[in-house]
Image: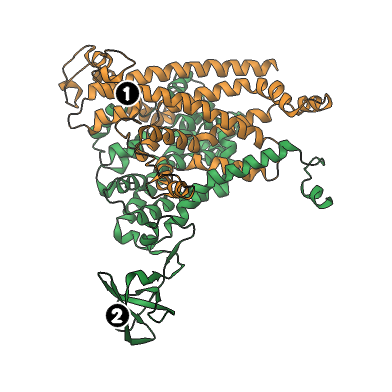
């Protein structure tokens, strides 16, 4: 039998049809939604409104004060997401870096320790949230520790500041292992003779860290930061189960705003949800392009090594 | 001193310096922080409802001792009672009215003792509340949720392996116009997270009649770009001569895919299978939107719905959480090496 021109398409068809149906058709419909109004789900029954959905979302007295915006929760969620992304990514990459450096040393039982830090990555967001909810609840373990230390128990998830702190903490706990693993792979690619040379020169451990490890790891570090940013901007699951976005809208993030506008509110404004998701997509495309640029730079750097 | 030197000797023969001590200290704190919360969850899941309500909580699952009393249907709780004559005795409580408790010695069921509730305290013993687990089937539709989760995970993984490997085969072993365009199209979906197309995807799925159907969760999830990428890279390393030889022997293209490529790509398929099981088992946002009927809930959705109840029954919730994390933990314990290697090489999770 000779291979005909249609053979590859026969093999591609199932995968490509699924992608077209559940990714590209929805993208097209989403664009349509974003420029039409009303509460009807069927695209043909929605009146066109031009940029009204966007201007509704963007109508604001001052962008720094969500309360002055027409869609105050949207801006609150944007500021929350920005604040969260900055804190979470910075701290998580920092701890992932420390952990990777420690795991890269000649330690006993490295496989076991690597597993310890990686394990939470595999847990489902719901399980992660419940594990911590159980610890942080009013009569939970943490408050027992507080009482044992003669401090007052705190309603950790009912005070805006603390709720935000724990949301950040829990997501670092859950995802750090993944980035540790990537950084560890980067560390293991650094040639060992560099460290041996440093030892011969009687360089301190601190000095070999700052002069060898960090500069050579920098490309990986940048990629990890952008990857973590892409994930952070889309945060939803753990937080939704842990705090439900509250108290108030203290831990409401952009994806939750989209979810609530499109699926929870009594009046479901699909147009607003779609416009919001397009704005989120814009941020993600920018971050992804940045990542592609960085990983190209990383490859070029490796060739130069 | 010699013993200390021996114990602190490192692999390269020198003694431990301060950086080693610091490393191990960090690791031990890490162990405590990473595993502690999970351990606490597992411990708590074996506590009785009464023990869960205790404050401050005990680490191990202790429960109040209870005994059978002749003539009574239920087991009765045991208390250590300060008797009026100053001695203490362990007695079973029959009933409590106001501040007066009526107790009895199970060995001599005719003598009642009445004391003030202040003079008795519960006798505690180590007791695993396994009923938290065994009652799950009756208390909530646990079996249904488990079945839904398993069904979605297994079927979606099989379809993912099939569809992705077929596409990867076409992209790696055929030259045809439009090949790189299709490859880019598939990889491009990496940039479209589900959150972006939530609303329109809901429309597509409801138009296909898949709302509140497990297939509505399965179909949109199976064409993973990661899987196509992973398998294509692996299949590129399979020599084309094998395919040519098979064609000489009049093998059909489907036979080449099924008999040659699939077996040879087994390691990559295994990695993708592990990933797919983890993804589908842990999925939350998309099932949350598609499945709104209680009898269609997956374990993750059931956990979420259950914890949102006004009165959370923590004893069942905790047991269900432990069961939900169990499969992933077992997979991880046995396949840690493959998972971590797969992630380090593909850079995805």
- Quarter holding the C terminus of chain A is top right
Q: CA distance from mark 2 to mark 1?
A: 60 Å
Q: Please name the residue shown 40% across and 35% down the image.
A: A162
Which hue is chain A drawn in?
A: orange
Image-based side of B126 in relation to B221, left or right? right
In the rendered image, residue B114, in percent from the top left (x then y), is placed at: 31, 79
In the rendered image, residue A185, in percent from the top left (x then y), is placed at: 63, 31
Q: Please name the residue shown 32% across and 34% down the image.
A: A246
User: Dot 1, how many residues are within 10 Å of its Cα: few (below 14), some (14-19), or many (20+)?
Assistant: many
In the rendered image, residue B164, in percent from the top left (x then y), is placed at: 46, 33
| Residue A224 tag number | none
Image-based side of A282 in relation to A115, left or right? left
Q: Secondary structure beneath disc 2?
A: loop
Which hue is chain B drawn in?
A: green
Q: Chain of mark 1?
A: A
Q: Is residue B329 above or below residue A171?
A: below
Have a look at marks 2 and 1 and say if they share a chain.
no
Residue B192 shows up from this direction: no
Q: Quadrant of residue B345?
A: top right
In the rendered image, residue A35, in percent from the top left (x then y), is placed at: 23, 15
Q: Quadrant of residue A76?
A: top left
The residue closer to the viewer here, A163 or A222, is A163
What coloring was used for the rendering?
by chain
Disc 2 target residue: B72
Q: Please name the residue shown 68% across and 38% down the image.
A: B22
Q: Secondary structure beneath disc 1?
A: helix
Residue B15 shows up from this direction: yes
Disc 1 target residue: A76
Image-based side of A265 in relation to A16, left or right? left
């Amino acid at each position: 039998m000779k291979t005909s021109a249609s053979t590859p398409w026969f093999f591609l068809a199932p995968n490509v049809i699924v992608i077209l149906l559940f990714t590209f058709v929805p993208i097209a419909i989403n664009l349509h939604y974003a420029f039409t109004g009303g509460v009807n789900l069927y695209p043909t029954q929605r009146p066109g409104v031009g940029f009204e959905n966007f201007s509704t979302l963007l109508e604001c007295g001052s962008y720094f004060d969500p309360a002055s915006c027409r869609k105050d929760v949207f801006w609150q969620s944007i500021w929350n997401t920005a604040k969260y992304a900055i804190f979470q990514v910075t701290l998580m990459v920092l701890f992932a870096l420390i952990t990777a450096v420690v795991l890269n040393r000649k330690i006993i039982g490295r496989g076991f320790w690597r597993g310890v830090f990686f394990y939470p990555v595999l847990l489902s967001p719901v399980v992660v949230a419940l594990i911590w909810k159980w610890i942080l609840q009013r009569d939970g373990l943490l408050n027992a520790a507080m009482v044992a230390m003669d401090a007052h128990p705190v309603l950790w998830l009912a005070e805006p500041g603390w709720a935000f702190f724990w949301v950040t903490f829990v997501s670092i706990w859950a995802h750090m292992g993944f980035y540790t693993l990537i950084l560890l792979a980067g560390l293991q690619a650094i040639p060992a003779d560099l460290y041996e040379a440093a030892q011969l020169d009687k360089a301190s451990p601190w000095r070999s860290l700052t002069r060898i490890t960090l500069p050579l790891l920098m490309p990986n570090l940048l990629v990890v930061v952008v990857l973590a940013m892409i994930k952070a901007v889309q945060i939803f699951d753990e937080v939704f189960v842990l705090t439900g976005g509250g108290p108030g809208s203290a831990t409401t993030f952009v994806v939750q705003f989209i979810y609530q506008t499109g699926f929870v509110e009594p009046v479901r404004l699909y147009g607003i949800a779609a416009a919001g998701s397009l704005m989120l997509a814009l941020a993600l495309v920018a971050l992804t392009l940045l990542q592609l640029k960085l990983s190209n730079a990383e490859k070029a750097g490796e060739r130069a090594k | 001193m010699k013993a200390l030197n021996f114990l602190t000797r490192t692999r390269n023969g020198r003694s431990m310096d301060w950086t080693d001590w610091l490393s191990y200290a960090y690791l031990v704190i890490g162990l405590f922080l990473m595993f502690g919360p999970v351990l606490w969850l597992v411990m708590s899941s074996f506590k009785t409802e009464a023990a869960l309500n205790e404050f401050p909580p005990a680490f191990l699952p202790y429960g109040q001792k209870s005994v059978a009393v002749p003539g009574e249907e239920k087991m009765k709780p045991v208390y250590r009672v300060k008797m009026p004559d100053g001695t203490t005795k362990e007695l079973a409580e029959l009933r409590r009215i106001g501040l007066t408790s009526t107790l009895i010695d199970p060995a001599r069921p005719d003598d009642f003792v009445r004391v003030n509730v202040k003079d008795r305290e519960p006798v505690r013993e180590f007791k695993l509340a396994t009923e938290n687990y065994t009652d799950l089937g009756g208390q909530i539709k646990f079996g249904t949720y488990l079945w839904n989760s398993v069904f979605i995970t297994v079927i979606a993984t099989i379809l993912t392996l099939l569809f992705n490997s077929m596409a990867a085969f076409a992209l790696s072993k055929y030259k045809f116009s439009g090949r790189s365009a299709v490859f880019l199209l598939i990889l491009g979906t990496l940039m479209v997270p589900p959150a972006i197309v939530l609303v329109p995807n809901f429309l597509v799925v409801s138009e296909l009649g898949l709302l509140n159907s497990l297939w509505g969760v399965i179909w949109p999830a199976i064409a993973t770009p990661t899987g196509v990428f992973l398998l294509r890279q692996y299949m590129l390393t399979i020599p084309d001569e094998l395919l040519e030889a098979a064609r000489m022997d009049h093998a059909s293209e489907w036979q080449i895919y099924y008999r040659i490529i699939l077996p040879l790509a087994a390691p990559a398929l295994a990695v993708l299978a592990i990933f797919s099981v983890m993804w589908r088992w842990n999925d939350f946002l998309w099932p949350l939107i598609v499945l709104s009927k209680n009898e269609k809930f997956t374990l993750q959705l059931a956990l979420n719905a259950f914890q949102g109840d006004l009165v959370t029954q923590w004893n069942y919730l905790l047991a269900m959480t432990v069961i939900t994390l169990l499969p992933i933990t077992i997979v991880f314990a046995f396949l840690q090496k493959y998972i971590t290697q797969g992630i380090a090489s593909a850079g995805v999770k």
